[in-house]
Image (cartoon, helix red, strand yellow):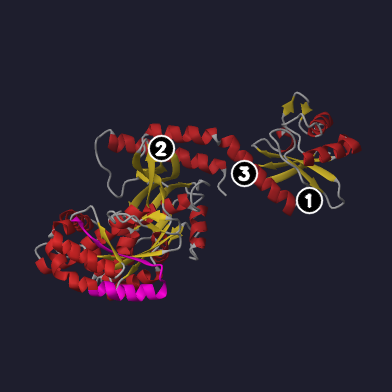
Amino acid sequence: MVSYSDISKGLDIYEKHVDDYNRNFRQRNKLPKNYDWRPYRWCSRDIVFSLLVVKHNRQGNFLEVDVCLVTNPPQYIDHSGARVALGFLLSEAYKCGGSMEIVFTENVEGGRVPGYICDLALDYDIHLKHVFEGHITPFEARQLYLELVGFSPETKARVMKLSIDGGLTPERACFVVLGGVWTVPEAEMIILSSDHPERILTSMSRPEDRHLYLNDLLIARSVVLGGALDRKLLKTELTKDGQVIESEDDETPLFIDFDSSFMAKIYRAETDLLIPWLGNAEQVLKTGQSLIVLIRARSDSEIQRYFVNDLRSLKALVHKYRLADLQTMICFLTPRDFEDIPKVQQRQITSLLEQNGVYLMISPDSLSGLNKEAIRRLETGRLIRQ
Amino acid sequence: MSQCCGKVPTPEDVQAIRRSIEGHQSRYQGDLGEQAVSEYVTNELELNAEFFDQKQHGFDGVYRDGAGKLVLIESKLTETPGLAALGYTQHGREGSVEWVEYVATQMTDPASKEYYSPDNAKIGEEILSIGPENVSFLVVHIDPGTLETDVSKLR
């Protein structure tokens, strides 16, 4: 429990840092270096979750924290403030290029790891060994980072294997998620479906390495298409003045998984929801019902050429999932380019899908749009610490 | 929740945060004080909580000792120590016989929304029947800086 005087003291120090920052950087129109003290506030609308002041300590090669004020507002999920603070500290430690060690100064609860962060670590079943010395070791930081991001056990195991093989550090996999390059389901899709996920997550292939780059792009665009469907399903739509608006705050409770052998997304609704992009076929996914979506980010010519293969995959998918549960809905997702193929073939494809009890799902995104977004993400990944 | 954003704050932001925290200080202190006192009284003083609806005014806590006698608790989260932290009201100083009698009377009055509830009425009647001067009254004081707790017995 943090006393009011601790909060007040922390706020005084925070205010001093903000004034220093204002004087040294903002007023001079300069940007701080990693090794300068930098104050941050983490808010959602007008609710403050965390106030932090950090710098990279060059001598010790660790992240130094001078203010760490955290609050867990009761109206949000458990440990919300601690999650925000720890997510930032770990990502900042990675970004600054240090050893991932985090050290809290005497100004933070007398030089210990903040109580709220210890509580969160305890929840993750991670034992911090140097709480009263105010240290989080690189090993503990790695464990906390992986838990905080929330990868599935299967993904974590693959990440650790990649780490042992020297292809990808777990910190990098976590950073691309918390840094906003890929979402958790998207990163899991890359890690589980690609033979070389490290190439995509580290943006290793350059456009000059044409074949490698195109191969990465093929996977990345499928992942972007899958991510677009995730977001569409997660968004709650409200009707206001006769217009449909997306709610910023409410997310549909939805379980998202991935079947790497088919490159298919698995959704399980925890409330009834309307399945999007089915054209005129309005279908509701009922609570507890599963939806399996075969993701195929193909151009119009690729759809025509590879549909036979895709149909084979679909039949195997139907066999696998309908055998377990007859109520499972199965969809085939393609970009808007489907509409560019001749009508006759469109009808043939739709008819074959219907015969197998599969719904056609057409994304409003075109393949060129998906490619553009995939390239943007690969380029963003290139700017991050390797 | 909507996206949580990290930004470098301006001095004005810090002032707004400070004002907000200070605005919530009394509530924060109240909640913190009651929680800490409740734990202290039950664990350290080994008193048992009585069915009591804490209202906006009146006692902070009502307990019974091992012999079943009523013990009234006033919790204080202030820098002023012990009995000096007790405030003054129109009906006498907090903890005084006059004040306890007034509060007990109000607790038995259904028209007094700030004190009355069926459970509180029973406690009020018991206090009035044995006499307010015969009811134990403790002040549990918590230092807001150190969170150290001490108890002063008024009666």
Disc 1 target residue: B47
Circle 1 sits in a helix, a strand or a loop, which is it?
loop
Secondary structure type for disc 2 = helix
**Disc number placed over residue B32 in the picture, else none:** 3
Residue A92, x across and y down, in percent = 34, 53
Residue lying farthest to the right in this orientation:
B130
Which residue, given by chain and number where applicable, does mark 2 sit on?
A16
Determine whether label 2 and label 1 are within 8 Å by CB. Answer: no
Looking at the image, which residue is at 21% across and 62% down? Answer: A297
Which residues are drawn in magenta?
A312-336
The residue positioned 49% from the left and 46% from the top of the image is A71
Give the percent coordinates (x, y) of residue A126. Answer: 48, 65
For the residues labelled 1 and 3, the Cα–Cα distance comes to 19 Å
Q: Residues within 10 Å of mark 3 (few under 14, many from 20)?
A: many
Q: Is residue B98 above or below residue A373?
A: above
Whichever of labels 1 and 3 marks the residue nearer the N terminus, that label is 3
